[in-house]
Amino acid sequence: MRINRINLKKRRNTPTKEAVLEVLATTGRAMSQDAIEKKIDIDIDRATIYRVLNRFCEDGVLHKVVAENGKQYFALCMKCDENKRPMHHFHFRCIKCETIECLPVEVNFSIPDDYLVENVNCVLTGTCKECSYN
């Protein structure tokens, strides 16, 4: 499946990029590099996947979520309209199923005037709605 809705900033599209985006779009949730690597159906080395993920973060295609345990996850924020997605939003990590998802809620905060915020990483931890009913 070709993912046309994502602006790749006029960079060359490669099978590796397509494979990484396909995995993230299919799952619809944030995934760690090792989980993405296990789902990719073409032979790609770990370093290449890591470079692709970080380049997508630089280009604004993905965002990186660092959980409270220090593990990095990468997300396409599929549940939000790309033009209406809050720039700074919360993520939720379920302690039962270990999924991380974007929440469409803007993070409101205040900081001293001399500071410039470039990124916000807010991870709420608990039980997701699916696991709550099981």
Image: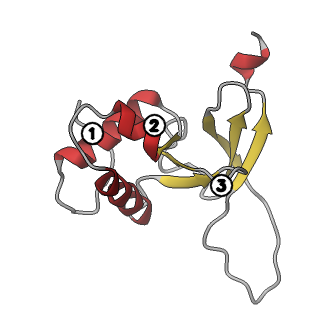
Helix, strand or loop at disc 2? helix
Write down the residue under mark 2.
35
Closest to the observer: 121 or 33?
A: 33
Task: Indicate the amino acid at tag 3.
Answer: Gly
Q: Position of residue 21 (x, y in %)?
A: 33, 42
Residue 120 in which image quadrant: bottom right
Would you call the spot at circle 1 few (<14 residues within 10 Å), some (14-19), or many (20 or more)? Answer: many
Q: Position of residue 133 (x, y in %)?
A: 77, 11
49 to 38, vertically: above or below: below
Mark closest to the chain's N terminus, 3 or 1:
1
Residue pictured at 69% horizontal, 38% vertical = 93
* View extreme (bottom): residue: 114
Distance between mark 2 and mark 3 Cα atoms: 15 Å
Helix, strand or loop at disc 3? loop
Task: Indicate the amino acid at tag 2.
Answer: Ala
Distance between mark 3 and mark 1 Cα atoms: 25 Å
Residue 88 in which image quadrant: bottom right
70 to 100, vertically: above or below: below
Task: Indicate the amino acid at tag 1.
Answer: Ala
User: On residue 19, which mark appears?
Assistant: 1
Helix, strand or loop at disc 1? helix
Write down the residue under mark 3.
70
